[in-house]
Amino acid sequence: MRLRAIRSPDPAIMLAGVKSGEIEKTKVLAAPFLFAVLEDFMIDGVKYTIKSFTFSLTDSLTTKSIDCEGYKLNEEALKLIENSKSGDKISFYHISVIGPDGTANYVKELNLTIK
């Protein structure tokens, strides 16, 4: 019998169930976690863990960036979101995930707008 390994695709990154577009500030503050989700993959149960990421908030005047460890927004990032206004842009980039084989990989960034 011959076995073949299948490489899993990079996961989609979601914040409070949202992967693109607009998000309510209250939703982010209630669930300040990033999740790596495999969509429409033929094998169930393949999991990725968020190791670290950089968060940034861009308002009408400035952009502030904060490095976060793990999958949760840290206190400094949450404070920026608390003070954000409708139309401010939030981004998550340099997202490092650990795949089922234990290796780290960087995945596509997530960009959202505060509703």
Image (spheres, rainbow, N blue to C red):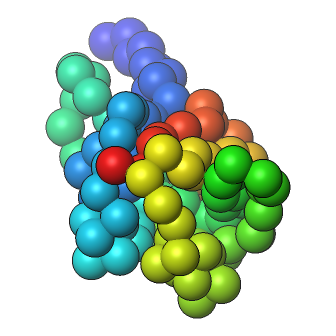
Q: Residue at x 60, y 32 (%)?
A: 108
Q: x, y percentage for residue 88?
A: 55, 50
Q: Is residue 94 left or right of residue 40?
A: right
Q: Residue at x 35, y 76 (%)?
A: 29
Q: Nearer the viewer, residue 110 or 10?
A: 110
Q: Nearer the viewer, residue 93 or 87?
A: 87
Q: x, y percentage for residue 91?
A: 61, 47
Q: Is residue 45 above or below residue 66?
A: above
Quadrant for the N terminus in the image: top left
Q: x, y percentage for residue 37?
A: 34, 42
| Residue projecting furthest to the top | 2
Answer with the quarter of the image where residue 76 lies: bottom right
Q: Is residue 66 above or below residue 74?
A: above
Q: x, y percentage for residue 84?
A: 52, 66
| Residue projecting furthest to the front | 60
Q: Is residue 15 left or right of residue 39?
A: right
Q: Residue at x 38, y 33 (%)?
A: 20
Residue 12 shows up from this direction: yes
Q: Nearer the viewer, residue 87 or 26?
A: 87
Q: Residue at x 26, y 65 (%)?
A: 27
Q: Nearer the viewer, residue 23 or 105?
A: 23
| Residue projecting furthest to the bottom | 75
Residue 46 shows up from this direction: no
Number of numbered discs overlaid on the protein picture: 0
